[in-house]
Image: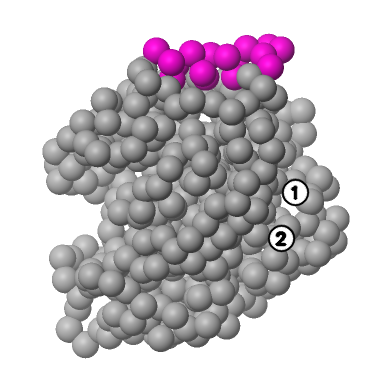
Amino acid sequence: MRTTLLALAGSTAAQSLLPSNPGGAVAVGIQAPSYAGFNNATIGISRGGLAVCVSGTFPVTANTTRNIKFNYKLPQNQSQVTETFVEIATDGSPLVEQIVGGLQSAGGTFSIGGTLCTPANDTAPKGVQLLTHGVGFDRYYWDFAPGYSYVDAAVQNGYAAFFYDRLGVGVSEQPDALNVVQAALEVEIAHELACMLRNGTYSNNKFEDVIGVGHSFGSIITQAVTSEYPSAFDAAILTGFSVNSTALPVFLTALNLAIAGENQPYRFPAVPAGYLVSGTAISNQIGFFRAPGFDPAILALAEAMKNTVTLGELFTTAAVVAGAPGYTNPLAVVNGAEDLPFCFGNCSYPTNKAAMVQLALYPNVSSSNFGTYLAPVTGHGLNLHYGAVGAYHYIQSFLKEHNLGL
């Protein structure tokens, strides 16, 4: 089924978004990235064929004292899962306050899955974009289908792209869904990855510029890195993000979250308790898409490829967002103009919600170092819309204007 859907996604409409160089193998004479730093490594190309990539797993050691201890028993059935999110969305509900029981330590060495891509024209980039995906997807949100690949856009503009499965997602390790896989620990993992990219851990490449790029929960993680570790990123791009969280309960309810092993028994037969997925393609459309700005084949592919989220992540979504007075490097906020969870469906009303990020969180980022872009007729899943191409061009132009990776 997935092969058929990928073929549909590579239709004329999709291909027109970004140039592509289709093919199933690395071209003769092109130097693939080294296996260094990767276990069980494989070499391949990006969806549109503009990048040559190495994929595998690798250990990441990360620790935090800021995970939250929850006085909450994992749901034993779907009814309990549904009731949890109905309670969260209920006005005046004390659920969140009742279940928070202080802070706890979490961490260790985790197996993480990831991919490093470099341009297929055999250049050696000085800059790498560290791509952190959001809820409902795995790393391939960034390299989704021919014509819908942020990776292709980045490498076409001379950057390397490093994208990974967050802890608990895809081929990455799947530890305890409540106490371990939370936002605070994932911030530490992202920071460690940034340091490892700068230090030459992967493919023996010591990148001069490390650019943090996130989507949704991945932007929350990226933003928290800029707050806790202001020098980790030479620039940060936050997509699907704002400081307006009023629509998050609506978003979570709309996703109709389901126990992963029951909703997708063939894909997730052995995930631990507390791992969830969106309920149906309709749930996916409400949360991530906006018509008529997408190809129905892409929605079908998103449903077929949907991935897990933990209760610990959902309970700590807003716990790590904080002011970043020490961060002064370039920053851009890029949203679908009709993003549901972070804009309640309208990122321009009553003001530009992307622009408010600088005022609320980044007092020392100058106006010359800050930018925003709202992709028209585009929902929360920015990369899966026709409008993605404009957002891709804006981001790469923004980085070049600030001489990053050049």
Residue 49, position in %: x, y?
27, 66
Q: Is residue 146 left or right of residue 236?
A: left
Q: Which residue is mark 1?
A: 322
Q: Residues within 10 Å of mark 1 (few under 14, many from 20)?
A: some
Residue 88 is one of the magenta-drawn residues = yes
| Up/down of 167 relative to 399, above or below | above
Residue 340, position in %: x, y?
56, 29
Task: Choose top left, top right, bottom left or bottom right for residue 281.
Answer: top left
Number of the label disc, if any, that sits on residue 247: none
| Up/down of 315 relative to 27, above or below | above
Q: Earlier in the sequence, mark 1 or mark 2?
A: 2
User: Residue at point 63% right, 19% down?
Assistant: 95
Residue 202, position in %: x, y?
41, 78
SS under mark 2? helix
| Up/down of 263 relative to 237, above or below | above
Residue 277 is one of the magenta-drawn residues = no
Taking depth in this image into account, of 295 and 330 the one nearest to the observer is 330
| Up/down of 71 relative to 91, above or below | below
Q: Which residues are magenta?
A: 79-94
Q: Are marks 1 and 2 in contact (CB under 8 Å)?
A: yes
Q: Is residue 362 left or right of residue 317?
A: right
Q: Residues within 10 Å of mark 2 (few under 14, many from 20)?
A: many
Residue 10, position in %: x, y?
24, 48
The amino acid pointed to by label 1 is Ala
The amino acid pointed to by label 2 is Glu
Q: Is residue 310 left or right of residue 187?
A: left
Q: Which residue is mark 2?
A: 228
Task: Choose top left, top right, bottom left or bottom right for residue 151.
Answer: bottom left
